[in-house]
Amino acid sequence: MGALEWFVEVVGAAGDVLALRVPSALEIGPRAMVPVAAGVAILAGLATMLGHTVVFAINRVTGLRMAAGMALGGLYLAVLRALTGVVIGLLALAVTRGAVDGELLAVVYLLAMAPHLLGVLVFIPHFGLMIGRLLEVWTLVSLAALLVHVLGIGRLPAAAIALAAWVVSQLLSHLLAKPLAVVSSRAWSLATGHATFITTQDILAGAPFVPLEQREQREHTA
């Protein structure tokens, strides 16, 4: 598969998912769809990161500070997505009593990330976080629609799996937020020699991870 053909298939599959349709290429088999599904997830992640980059630029955060913030944000989201995928797999196994193709389920989960291709819009002032939350809801609906097809289950069980996975991801985000804030602040201090301030609330809000020096934080709250 050439690069252009791959890109066309990625865009086509993403369009189907956005419209809550099952991509026709999925009928070929999960192994053939892995590059396409991975492409959808990668482009969705890049779109979201691009939106955060604009937010950094608007707030005049550049250079190493921007790079650190983007790296932390990307790592956090990757870990959270991976853990959520594991939860979806376990729930699917429980619902189908073990009759699940793990590779197919992974492809479906990656395809369900298609709504985040619009993640670049998170830079819009005052509406960025709301847009991010709407994209998460769209992703859950897309996931449920795909699960109905690939697992051969009803809409209610599929919706229950998607919703349960979302609830677990929220719990995980709360558990991971504080340790990440502490570790990332410590790492920034060791790398730059400056104390940093990253709030747990910033992480839970899904905002860009901007390491702010304590002096700057005092100025903002004064």
Image (tube, rainbow, N blue to C red):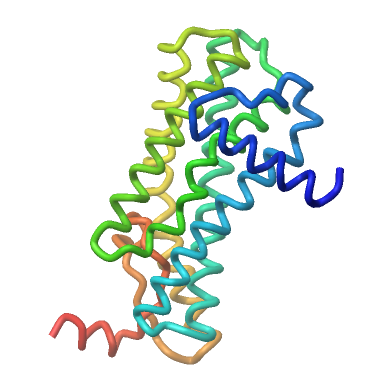
- Asked if residue 88 is positioned above or below residue 180 in the image, the reply reads above
Q: Position of residue 22 (x, y in %)?
A: 59, 23
Q: Which residue is situated farthest in the right direction here? A: 1
- Asked if residue 180 is positioned above or below residue 33 in the image, the reply reads below
Pick the quarter of the image with the C terminus: bottom left
Q: Which residue is drawn at 72% across and 26% down?
A: 25
Q: Position of residue 64 (x, y in %)?
A: 53, 84
Q: In this view, does 5 lie to the left or right of 98?
A: right
Q: Where is residue 98 in the image (x, y as percent from the top left)?
A: 65, 12
- Asked if residue 32 is positioned above or below residue 83 in the image, the reply reads above
Q: Which residue is drawn at 42% across and 82% down?
A: 61
Q: Which residue is drawn at 47% across and 71% down?
A: 53
Q: Position of residue 156 (x, y in %)?
A: 41, 11
- Give the quadrant of residue 177: bottom left
Tell which of 168 and 133 is nearer to you.
Answer: 133
Pick the quarter of the image with the N terminus: top right
Q: Which residue is situated farthest in the left direction here? A: 222
- Give the quadrant of residue 71: bottom right
Q: In this view, does 145 lie to the left or right of 23?
A: left
Q: In this view, does 100 lie to the left or right of 88?
A: right
- Give the quadrant of residue 200: bottom left
Q: Is residue 183 left or right of residue 35?
A: left
